[in-house]
Amino acid sequence: MGRNGSFHIAIDDVTCVQCAGCVSICPTEALHMQGLTLECHDPTCIGCDLCVRFCPVVALSLHALSAPPVRAEA
């Protein structure tokens, strides 16, 4: 697992059946339903992958966000 905000859950809106199982299994509440649309709050996601493994229709995928470059002090 990584630090909060270093991951993004991609949601395939065509495949998602809005069962909200991923919402209930997410330990950080990064996923939520907005009406009938599933949304991810990236800063909260810790990359545990539970939602991806739990999704019955494989509508979710986890992506690591690249960290901003570290600038060396001159």
Image (cartoon, rainbow, N blue to C red):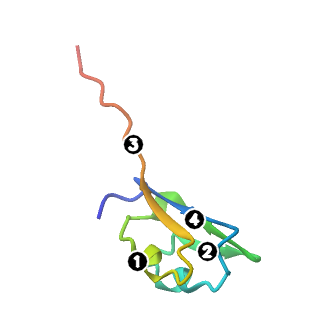
Q: Residue at x 44, y 56 (%)?
A: 63
What residue lies at 67% left-to-right and 81% top-to-bottom? 18
Under circle 1, the secondary element is: helix
**Alpha-carbon neighbours of circle 1 within 10 Å: few (<14), some, or many (≥20)?**
few
Which of the two labelled residues, at mark 3 and mark 1, occupies the earlier sequence position?
1
Q: Which residue is more in the foreground, 27 or 73?
A: 27
Residue located 62% across and 65% down the image? 12
Q: On the rendered image, what quadrant is the C terminus found in?
A: top left
Q: Amino acid at mark 3?
A: Ser
Task: Look at the picture and state if 51 lies above or below 74.
Answer: below
Residue type, mark 4 in image: Cys
Q: Which mark is residue 50?
A: 1
Label 4 to label 3, Cα distance in Å? 17 Å
Q: Residues within 10 Å of mark 2 (few under 14, many from 20)?
A: some
Compare marks 4 and 3 and give the one earlier in the sequence.
Answer: 4
User: In the drawing, does residue 67 fall left or right of residue 32?
Assistant: left
Q: Determine which of the numbered discs, if any, sits on residue 40 in the image.
A: 4
Q: Is the C-beta separation of discs 2 and 3 under 8 Å?
A: no
Real-space CA distance between mark 4 and mark 2, rounded to the nearest whole angstrom: 7 Å
Q: Is residue 72 above or below residue 74?
A: below
